[in-house]
Image (cartoon, rainbow, N blue to C red):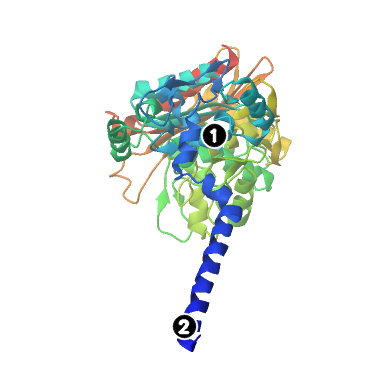
Amino acid sequence: MNRPLRHIAIFCGLLVMALLVRANWIQYVKSEPLANHENNRRVKIAQFATPRGDIIVGSDAVTGSKAVEGTDFKYRRTFKQGPMYAPVTGYASQAQGMSLLEKTYDSILSGQDDRFAFRHAKDVITGEPRRGGSVITTIDPKAQKAGYKGLTDLKARGAVVALEPDTGKVLALVSTPSYDPSVFAGNSFKEGDKFQALVKDKSKPLANRPLRETFPPGSTFKILTAAAALENGVVSDVDARSDAVSPYPLPLSTNRIGSEAGDAVCNKASMKTAMQYSCNNVFLDAASKVGAEKMRETAEKFGFNADVYSEEFGDMLATKSLYPTKLDKPGTALTGMGQGSLTSTPMQMAMVTAALANDGKLMQPYIVDELRGPDLSVLEKNEPKLKSQAVSEETAKKVQEMMEFTANEGSAKRALIDGVTVGGKTGTAQRGVNVDDEVPYGWFVSYGKADGKSVAVAVFIDPTDMDISRSDISGGRLGAPIAKSVMKAVLGK
């Protein structure tokens, strides 16, 4: 064989060897990732080949499955009271994929979890169809309904989160405006158009406001500022007059910041009075004296600067809320009143409120109570887990004293419930640089305790779409009645 032919033969041999190596690599190394890839049509066919298991709220399923004909997908997902529960369930669409609980627990709901292998083998022998397991949530249906009704009655963009302080259970998770996951659960062109219309809607109905969007928390953050000041010895007596003048001169600035309650009330007010009337000067001064590092450390003990993550179930609940690093003195002071570059999810402010109501103990929030197999056997069960001791019990009780005083004698009166110990704090948060051109956000946080039960609530309201004057936008006026109805639903009052 002459040299050119020999070179060609060797080259062809190398090509054949490369093909064999590639084929074996795909078959034995990459087979599982490719088999389970989201764009593999066989995966989607398997997901909808049998009725999916259900997501349970209370004792009732809020999901279902409907048989369809003329397509590879044998079943289509259905949702009961879809808009109300969409922030919890997410969607399961043949064309658009999945989100939230539907995505996180797809292997359970579709019956493809490895723990079902023995049952699958048995079903093959007996001829039984594959069945999915169930996801049991912690959601209280009455609390969810109360929060959803409150926001939709206002016709507001907003969010409600309710937590059980001593366990971390998520009792309500509301986002408005919302959407019905059933309308695009299939793969028709019409359903695709409906999904795209939701994507383009300026009111962002697909957004999960309680978990995945952050906003300046405004004056609701003052409860954390108070905790930081007490914990770090800046304030020891909440009834003692401060030296914070009103209007307050922002450090290293010519700006002076006043308060809605007026200088006569707020000038050198005690921290309890400042909480009662939401005096900015006292909390600006407190944050400035605590300092950027200690303020950030306290915020992080309450959960800031970290994703809210459920380790047991591998489920990322909420994106991180941010207390910035390397703040200058003016920036640090502004965080004391929940402004500046500080941002928070409604979930995070519910966590802060719950931890203070729970004597400083921050419990890990979780929304899934149990995972069950098709035979209703318990596969996994979540248990309460301490996330951190955010502040001491002594500090927490002093903040409780101020929040309860604010509910009884101050700006949080609209949340009071007969026979219930209520603590609350209002908040109005400015957004943007030109505050006069943008309507502010409304916030309200509260807790209620009665008959050995407790609940912490955060209400967020974006009044962009509301027919309301700027002067009428406040957390106490808009958010407190919603928080009250949620607390009553949980506490049975």
Q: Secondary structure at mark 1?
A: helix
Position of the C terminus by quadrant = top right
User: As rendered, which of 327 and 62 lies closer to the eye?
Assistant: 62
Q: Is residue 252 above or below residue 290?
A: below
Q: Secondary structure at mark 2?
A: helix
Whether residue 209 is visible, yes or no, is: yes
* Mark 1 crowdedness (10 Å alpha carbons): few <14, some 14-19, many ≥20: many
Q: Identify which residue is drawn at 48% across, 46% down.
A: 343
Mark closest to the chain's N terminus, 1 or 2: 2
Q: Find residue 170 and report its image quarter.
A: top right
Q: Position of residue 142 (x, y in %)?
A: 52, 16
Task: Count the labels in the image.
Answer: 2
Where residue 169 appears, as percent x and y from the top left, is: 62, 28
Whether residue 291 is visible, yes or no, is no
Q: Position of residue 217 (x, y in %)?
A: 47, 41
Mark nearer the viewer, 1 or 2: 2
How crowded is the residue under tag 2: few (<14 C-alpha within 10 Å), some, or many (20+)? few
Q: Quadrant of residue 359?
A: top right
Q: CA distance from mark 1 to mark 2?
A: 56 Å
Q: Mark 2: which amino acid?
A: Leu
Identify the residue shown where x is 52% and y is 44%. Answer: 319
Measured along the vertical axis of the image, is residue 11 above or below residue 383?
below
Q: Residue at x 55, y 29 (%)?
A: 109
Nearer-the-camera pick, 268 or 421: 421
Identify residue for label 1.
106
Which of the labelled discs sits on residue 140, or is there none? none
Q: Is residue 80 left or right of residue 59?
A: left
Toward the viewer: 473 or 252?
473
Amino acid type, residue under disc 1 in the picture: Asp
Q: Position of residue 63 (x, y in %)?
A: 48, 22
Label placed on residue 5: 2
Check the image and report above or below for 403 versus 41: above
